[in-house]
Image (spheres, grey):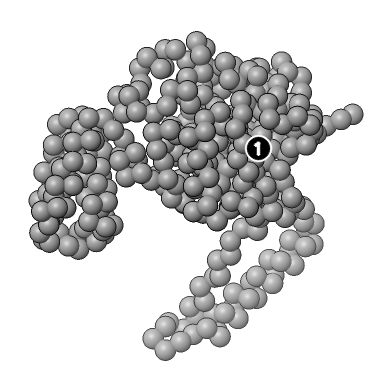
Amino acid sequence: MGRIVGWAAEYLKRHGASSARLDSQLLLGHVTGLDRVQLYVQFDRPMLPEELEKFRELVRRRVAGEPVAYILGVREFFGHVFVVSRHVLIPRPETEILVDAVIRWARPKPAPKSVEEADAEARAASEALAAAAVDSVTPGEPEGAPAAPEVTAPTADERPLRIVDVGVGSGAIAISLAIALPAATVVGIDISPEALEVAAQNADRLSVRDRVKLVRGDGLAPLRNPATVDVVVSNPPYLDAELMATLEKDVRDFEPHGALSGGHDGLSMIRPLIGDAARVLKPGGLLAMEVAGTDQAGAVRDLIAESGAFEGATILDDYSKRGRVITAIRLKEP
């Protein structure tokens, strides 16, 4: 199998694949049912004729530009595996910043400690470490070695938050939030019935269907009652005409344009979303959106300020130090 991986990687590279070896390994793993470590362990294992035939077909699809996620039918996001199809955008690492921003806002903030409390905690921790150094010594372990600290997961906010994900797509954002915030309920809205089917499948697979309600609709139109939502989160279509014209083949020819194009200036979906979010959010509620990693973040921040309904607009950078996520808080009533 090692020789086949090398051949496929070189073939994909000649046809423009930017991650040719990884693509080759993922496709071969899909065919054989082996993960990347197992592929290395079974480097010399010969491929069955039917495996080789199927692998060649997948390589041909990749050479034609089809994204690996669509070929495999799944994509990992925020530590979970999501089913994807050509009816939904492929979840991207940058969008994890958006999910993380909502979780950080939603989880409880510890009250500030007094100097006396902080000193007492420090003394207790020091004494516990000293005790561990004596009590936890085992044969073969050097005397004085402290016990490994316990690792505990962060505690999710127990407030019954109501979160709305506009443009739910595969459900990656909505479902990741439902998993991370077990007391929250999430409404996912999308205009595409096919996308809603994919989201429902993922909610079922990841066991949050009871807390993720999926609704067909345009933007926030399905929500009629004002000031009833704690969080509005969205990865809206935000690419302008110039960016749409320069998309790579695997995006341009395969991913749904309706989930990508934000009109001439990239803001055609964002403008109404800001106004509608102001209507449905409770005072003190959170608006969180992904935007293009260009100067668009500044333009969106200006739109939020012009609405007069929000405060504390903040731009968060992506891994390339480009403004990718913007958050703002709904003004509280005087």
Label 1 belongs to which residue?
164
- Looking at the image, which residue is at 77% across and 62% down? 117
- Looking at the image, which residue is at 71% across and 66% down? 121
Taking the view exactly as shown, the residue that stands out farthest to the right is 334
Q: Residues within 10 Å of mark 1 (few under 14, many from 20)?
A: many
Numbered disc 1: secondary structure: strand
Q: Amino acid at mark 1?
A: Val
Can you say which quadrant of the picture contains the N terminus?
bottom left
Residue 326 versus residue 54: which sits nearer the camera? 54
User: What percent of the width, then of the height, locates residue 55?
Assistant: 18, 46
Can you say which quadrant of the picture contains the C terminus?
top right
Taking the view exactly as shown, the residue that stands out farthest to the bottom is 139
Residue 324 versus residue 257: which sits nearer the camera? 257
Please tell me whether residue 206 is drawn above or below residue 129 in the rendered image: above
User: What percent of the width, then of the height, locates residue 305?
Assistant: 71, 19
Left or right of residue 283, residue 318 in this image: left
- Looking at the image, which residue is at 73% across and 18% down? 307
